[in-house]
Amino acid sequence: YAAKRARQGAVTYSPEIDKSSQKNLSLLSDMRAALERNQFQLWVQPKVSLHDYRLIGVEALVRWVHPERGMVFPDQFIPFAEQSGFIRSLTHWIMDQAAQTLKLWQAQDLVLKMSVNISTMDLMDQDLPQKFAAILDQYALATSQFCLEITESAIMDDPVRAHQTLDNLHAMGMDLSIDDFGTGYSSLAYLKQLPVNELKIDKSFVLKMDKDNADSRIVKSTIDLAHNMQLRVVAEGVENQQVMQLLRELGCDQVQGYFLSKPMPASQLTVWKQDWEQRAAQLPTSGT
Ligand code: C2E
Ligand code: MG
Ligand code: MG
Ligand code: MG
């Protein structure tokens, strides 16, 4: 048992093998305390339309600002949060922050849509739809302002229960997105039964699609597949203008990536938007 914890620690929290076991034992209590002490932060990354370069919405990406470790990225604690069940408390906090932030931005006419990542453990919670409904009620926001991003593997852990929760969330009016599309093991036969609105092409296919023909063919096929299934398609991992223009020529609907903006603290979105509108005015708007 200790060895298993140590192994998990080595991959999910700390690369230092000698101290990892002890550190890992305290990770769960650290995360709980972090929630109490407001060490988690809601960061956001813009999603932009390829039709007119307008800001469509943002994706919420959690950050943990640890007093000793500094910035801890989600890949270092989300897996452990899932294994321990802590993710449910964290997801609740993120949804609350996301709603509070969106309420403010709506009043400022800044942006109206927010995407939130959810995990397997969240999908296994039958009460998740009601919990989300209660939060949005509290801020008087519409369910249609929220999109939930779920990876194929999170769904395939328990496809039957996942399908049930997704049906309920969708019936409430929330949009659903398949995140990291192309990297999981779900079948199209299964996916077509889900009430999905959006496919997000995994960044591994997008990052070098301006240099790698195989990648760009995969991206093209995925865009066509999504459109044939009446789904909106978003590319993540857009790091330069060439890739953005290629995606535009291929008919992709929306983009996200470092070329537009790295994830930023929610408070920086106003300034980013002003800057982006100036950059966007210089971009080509048709054909070539
Ligand atoms: P994801 O949902 O697929 O999010 C996209 C990740 O790609 C983010 O990493 C983002 O910072 C990064 N990214 C965006 N544009 C670019 C780009 O142009 N180039 C490169 N190289 N990377 C880019 P991040 O924020 O470290 O999050 C990693 C993963 O952690 C997320 O992948 C998501 O699965 C998970 N995660 C993040 N926040 C949450 C959360 O609030 N709840 C849950 N359950 N999972 C979260
Ligand atoms: Mg995501
Ligand atoms: Mg993704
Ligand atoms: Mg990912």
Image (cartoon, rainbow, N blue to C red):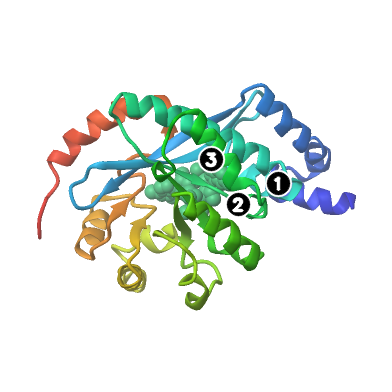
- Residue 31: where, in percent of width, then height? 70, 33
Q: Amino acid at mark 1?
A: Phe
Q: Is residue 98 left or right of residue 119?
A: left
Mark closest to the chain's N terminus, 2 or 1: 1
Is the CB of mark 2 within 8 Å of ligand 1? yes
Q: Which residue is mark 1?
A: 80
Task: State which quadrant residue 30 falls in.
Answer: top right
Q: Residue furthest bottom?
A: 189
Q: Relative to the observer, which residue lies in front, 221 or 85? A: 85
Q: Amino acid at mark 3?
A: Ala
Mark closest to the chain's N terminus, 3 or 2: 2
* Residue at the image position 76 percent from the left and 37 percent from the top: 28
- Residue 181: where, in percent of width, then height? 46, 64
Taking the image as drawn, is residue 229 in sight?
yes
Q: Nearer the viewer, mark 1 or mark 3?
A: 3
Q: Which residue is mark 2?
A: 119
Task: State which quadrant residue 94 falls in.
Answer: top right
* Residue at the image position 36 percent from the left and 72 percent from the top: 218
Task: State which quadrant residue 192 falls in.
Answer: bottom left
Is the CB of mark 1 within 8 Å of ligand 1? no
Q: Is residue 217 depicted above or below 259 in this figure? A: below
User: Which mark, residue 133?
Assistant: 3
Q: Quadrant of the C terminus?
A: bottom left
Q: CA distance from mark 1 to mark 3?
A: 26 Å
**Secondary structure state at the residue bearing disc 3:** helix
**Secondary structure state at the residue bearing disc 2:** loop
